[in-house]
Image (cartoon, rainbow, N blue to C red):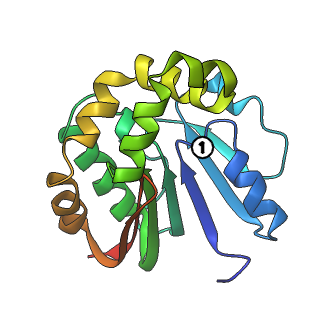
Amino acid sequence: MRRDAQIVELFCGRCNDIRALERLGFINLEGVDVSPNLLAVYRGEAKLYQSDCRNLPFADKSRDIIILQGGLHHLPEFPIDIEQTLSETCRVLRPNGRFVLIEPWLTLFLRLIHFLSERDFIRLISNKFDAFATMTHYEKETYYRWLNKQNEIPFLLGKYFIEIRFQQKFGKMLFIGKPK
């Protein structure tokens, strides 16, 4: 992958993933998030946009790679918001561009994590399990709706992208595709 590829991360938050890409030598990085408070945390060279992923501030066919890690399951209206985001992503990607999506997926491993995070003792001895249980509590409506739509999600992705890779492992779904 070219280090000068134009890469956008949607739902970039505090830009931890952008910082990782910077450390790997990528130089044309951009991030999009709706929260000005999260974007304000970042200190680096990437250009950030306070914007909604359903209406991206980029020209048609202008970016090489769009990365979205753990953001779609936060959108309130399924499938409308998902389709708007996927449509916008497809519009912005160059014809041979790549869309990289990582989202929670209800595997046996994730079911185990849910089970453990619901145990008070586990939460007391593990900050990670406590943080996970807190997240699922406050985001339960969109999070569990997403997990319960696993039959529909590949269909929605297939409307906009040609699948290159689809993998479900350790409670995550990885999808890599190129625009149709």
Percent across and percent down for residue 172 are 43, 55
Is residue 142 depicted above or below 56 in this figure?
above
Tell which of 102 and 40 is nearer to you.
102
Percent across and percent down for residue 119 are 48, 21
Percent across and percent down for residue 93 are 43, 68
Q: Residue at x 63, y 25 (%)?
A: 36
Tell which of 173 and 38 is nearer to you.
173
Which residue matches tag 1? 12
Tell which of 6 and 113 is nearer to you.
113
Is residue 7 depicted above or below 10 in this figure?
below
Q: Residue at x 68, y 52 (%)?
A: 17
If the image is split into quadrants, where does the N terminus sit? Answer: bottom right
Q: Residue at x 49, y 47 (%)?
A: 57
Percent across and percent down for residue 20 are 76, 57
Which quadrant of the structure image shows residue 126? top right
Which quadrant of the structure image shows residue 178? bottom left
**Residue 53 visible (yes or no):** no
* Residue type at numbered disc 1: Cys
Tell which of 88 and 136 is nearer to you.
136
Is residue 83 depicted above or below 66 in this figure?
above
Neighbours of disc 1 within 10 Å: few (<14), some (14-19), many (20+)? many
* 127 left or right of 91 in image: right
* 68 left or right of 7 in image: left
Element type at mark 1: loop
